[in-house]
Amino acid sequence: MTLQGVDHHFDEARPEPAFSNSDEGIGWTDANCSTCVHDLAARTGNQLGGCPLVTVSLMGRRPVQWLDGPRDEHGRYSRARQYVCVEYRHEDDGPTDPQPIPDPPGQLQLLPRDDYEGVRMLLRPNPATYPAPAA
Ligand code: SF4
């Protein structure tokens, strides 16, 4: 899925600040957005062409595309991996638009794709609800 405008992502964002302070925010964006194609325009001088998700975070909301990164048993996380952005694409990764596998020629499409395309919300297993594997 390609990114939409700031208003769209602001409306769907979680109504909570993404970071507790600017140092935390700069640490995360430096570790993630500094190589992402979606913020390439801002890095090359077009400040209005930056990533809308970063803009949403600066407006006090947490984009739904930012999933929790790995935590240790105490809930601690590194600044660089506080979130995992599902829209991250390395700037050397090729085209920014998704490249779906085309329907085979002469075949019918069983289900329309539109309803199934969008942001994936992956959840990590909750260790409290999953028993440890038997030894
Ligand atoms: S898509 Fe995600 S990783 Fe890429 S610039 Fe935007 S917020 Fe950063």
Image (tube, rainbow, N blue to C red):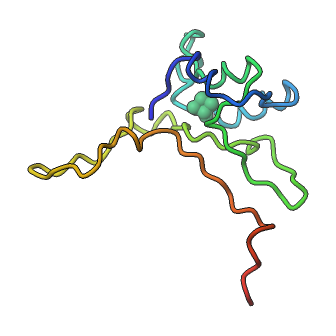
Let me know if residue 86 appears in the view: yes
The foreground one among 96 and 45 is: 96
Question: For this view, does 127 lie left or right of residue 20?
Answer: left
Q: How many marks?
A: 0
| Residue found 32% across the figure and 44% down from its top | 100
Where is the C terminus found, in terms of image quarters? Answer: bottom right
- Where 88 sits versus 72, above or below? above
Rendered residue at 41%/44% (across/down): 116
Q: Report x, y in % for residue 57.
A: 71, 24
- Looking at the image, in which quadrant does ligand 1 appear? top right
Question: Residue lying furthest left in this view?
Answer: 106
Among the 4 quarters of the image, the one containing residue 117: top left
Q: Residue at x 80, y 41 (%)?
A: 79
The percent position of residue 1, horizontal first and vertical second, equals: 44, 35
Q: Nearer the viewer, residue 91 or 127?
A: 127
Q: Position of residue 120 (x, y in %)?
A: 54, 45
Reply above or below: 95 against 54.
below
Which of the 4 image quadrants contains residue 128? bottom right
Task: Say left or right for 91 vs 65.
Answer: left
Residue at 84%, 24% (x, y): give it: 22
* Picture coordinates of residue 49, whole percent (x, y): 54, 14
Left or right of 104, for residue 89: right
Instruction: Name above or below for residue 134 compared with residue 91.
Output: below
Farthest right residue?
74
Instruction: Please indicate, yes or no, whether residue 34 appears anywhere in the rendered image.
Output: no
